[in-house]
């Protein structure tokens, strides 16, 4: 649990003294410094799973930037402070690092919402499969919201959402729509089967 590394607002650390005038920045900076220090013990996974672990840490950072309500300058300072370490761990490939340094809070929020859904999709699906008939509306409305959000970012050409698009298509494959068929049965009236049809600008 990465949140176990969160420090108090008044806790200090040497690596973040440059931002001591901003308590929220200090809290985030010192907390993330602890995570980076423990990276090898946090990501105890097989080599081919390390990217997924690093993605999880990166999205945790995104969520904390959002929660801390950091200003633009503090966001820049946060990325710059850890860039050398991020490039050898979370950012992995230098050519991709600029895509992963997101400064727009609205973009961060959308990325985080989509990532949370994709990360927990199996749990969501299991709950939907075992919920009493007639009680599905809350889950179906949530899934419909996520699909609408994905439809919104699908045409974005900037590369900001490439990771989310990739993960989404792994689950909801264009050529094998078993997941969509299953959701359609659980959420009638949402027309989720229209999702991958290019001519469809809306669902129902």
Image (tube, rainbow, N blue to C red):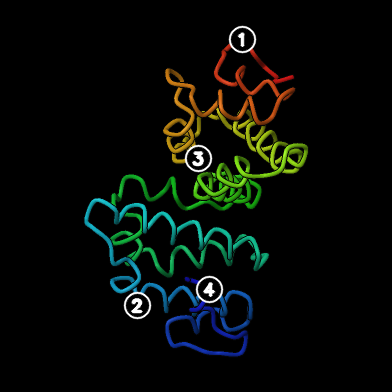
Q: Relative to the observer, which residue lies in front, 140 or 72?
A: 140
Query: Which residue lies at the image location 64% right of the left edge and 65% below the top edge?
Result: 70
Residue 37 numbered tag: 2
The answer for how far apart the CA atoms under marks 3 and 2 are is: 28 Å
Q: Residues within 10 Å of mark 2 (few under 14, many from 20)?
A: few
Compared to residue 115, the image places residue 158 above or below, namely above
Query: Which residue lies at the image location 32% right of the left edge and 66% below the top edge?
Result: 43
Q: For numbered disc 4, what is the local secondary structure?
A: helix
Q: For numbered disc 1, what is the local secondary structure?
A: loop
Which residue is label 4 attached to?
Answer: 3
* Marked residue nearer the N-terminal end (3 or 2): 2
Q: Nearer the viewer, mark 1 or mark 3?
A: 1
Percent position of residue 182, x then y:
56, 28
Quarter of the image containing the C terminus?
top right
Residue 160 numbered tag: 3
Q: Nearer the viewer, mark 3 or mark 2?
A: 2
* Marked residue nearer the N-terminal end (4 or 3): 4
Relative horizontal placement of residue 54, taking residue 135 as reference (left or right)? left
The answer for how far apart the CA atoms under marks 1 and 3 are is: 24 Å
Tell me whether the residue at label 4 lies in contact with that at label 3, contact meaning CB atoms closer than 8 angstroms: no
Q: Relative to the observer, which residue lies in front, 183 or 149?
A: 183
The answer for how far apart the CA atoms under marks 2 and 4 are is: 15 Å
Q: Nearer the viewer, mark 4 or mark 3?
A: 4
* Marked residue nearer the N-terminal end (2 or 4): 4
Q: Relative to the observer, which residue lies in front, 94 or 11?
A: 11
Q: Residues within 10 Å of mark 1 (few under 14, many from 20)?
A: few
Percent position of residue 97, x then y:
38, 50
Which residue is label 1 attached to?
Answer: 199
């Amino acid at each position: 649990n990465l949140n176990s590394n969160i420090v108090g607002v008044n806790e200090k650390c040497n690596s973040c003294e440059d931002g001591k005038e901003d308590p929220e920045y200090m809290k985030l900076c010192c907390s993330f410094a602890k995570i980076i220090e423990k990276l090898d013990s946090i990501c105890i996974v097989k080599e081919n799973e390390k990217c997924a672990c690093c993605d999880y840490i990166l999205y945790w950072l995104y969520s904390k930037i959002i929660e801390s309500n950091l200003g633009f300058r503090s966001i820049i300072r946060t990325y710059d402070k850890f860039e050398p370490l991020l490039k050898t761990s979370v950012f992995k490939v230098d050519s991709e690092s600029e895509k992963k340094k997101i400064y727009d809070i609205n973009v961060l929020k959308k990325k985080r919402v989509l990532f949370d859904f994709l990360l927990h999709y199996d749990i969501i699906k299991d709950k939907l499969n075992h919920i009493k008939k007639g009680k599905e509306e809350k889950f179906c409305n949530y899934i419909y919201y996520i699909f609408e959000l994905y439809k919104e970012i699908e045409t974005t050409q900037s590369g900001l959402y490439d990771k989310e698009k990739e993960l989404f298509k792994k689950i909801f494959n264009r050529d094998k729509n078993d997941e969509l068929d299953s959701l359609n049965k659980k959420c009638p009236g949402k027309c989720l089967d229209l999702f991958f049809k290019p001519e469809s600008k809306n669902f129902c």
